[in-house]
Amino acid sequence: MKVNQAAFCTVTALAVVTAASIGAAVTTASTVAAVAYGVLGIGSGAVSIASITAWLDPNSTSVANYFSNLKSHAGYAIAGTFQVVAQTFVQALVQGAANGITKRVGDAIGGRQEPQVIVIDDKRRAY
């Protein structure tokens, strides 16, 4: 098997795994399963990127060298991909908190209050 054939088979298989994982994450009803499929999809996507960069590596002159390079490229790709995902989640969390604080401060300055809950008892009295 030549390097191009090995790279094509590897990338194609990883693309199928990534698509299936993301598809399962989107369609599952369980939150735990969605997270697990999402992590699997992100990981296989990262390895797919690594397989392409290993194929582009000038040291990938044989199939053995290609898979050796794939191993080292995969470590960097997986770590980098999960770092980007983690930073995105933290950024979304900070942005959400900042938006909530800004809204509450703006409402307090503008004199707007939270809607009051009206409780009606059995004698139809509101308080």
Image (cartoon, rainbow, N blue to C red):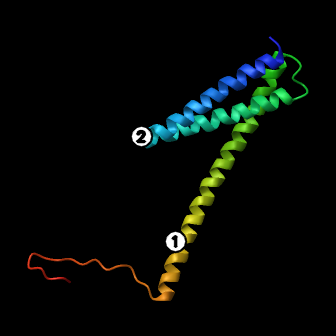
Dot 1: within a 10 Å radius of its alpha carbon, few (fewer than 14), some, or many (20 or more) residues? few
**Amino acid found under the numbered disc labelled 2:** Ser
Q: Mark 2 — residue?
A: 30
Q: Which residue is mark 1?
A: 100
Circle 2 residues within 10 Å: few <14, some 14–19, many ≥20: few
Mark 1–mark 2 CB contact (< 8 Å): no
Q: Secondary structure at mark 1?
A: helix
Quarter of the image holding residue 75?
Answer: top right
The three-letter code of the residue at mark 1 reads Gly
Farthest-out residue, right: 58
Residue 61 has which mark? none
Residue sitting at x 52%, y 76%? 103
For the C terminus, which image quadrant?
A: bottom left
- Sequence-wise first label, 1 or 2: 2
Residue 5's place in the image compared with 95, above or below, is: above
Rounded to the nearest angstrom, the CA distance separating label 1 from label 2 is: 28 Å
The structure residue drawn at horizontal position 59% and vertical position 65%, both measured from the top left corner, is 95
In the image as oriented, which residue stretches furthest toward the left? 123
Q: Is residue 90 above or below residue 13?
A: below
Q: Residue at x 18, y 82 (%)?
A: 126
| Label 2 secondary element | loop
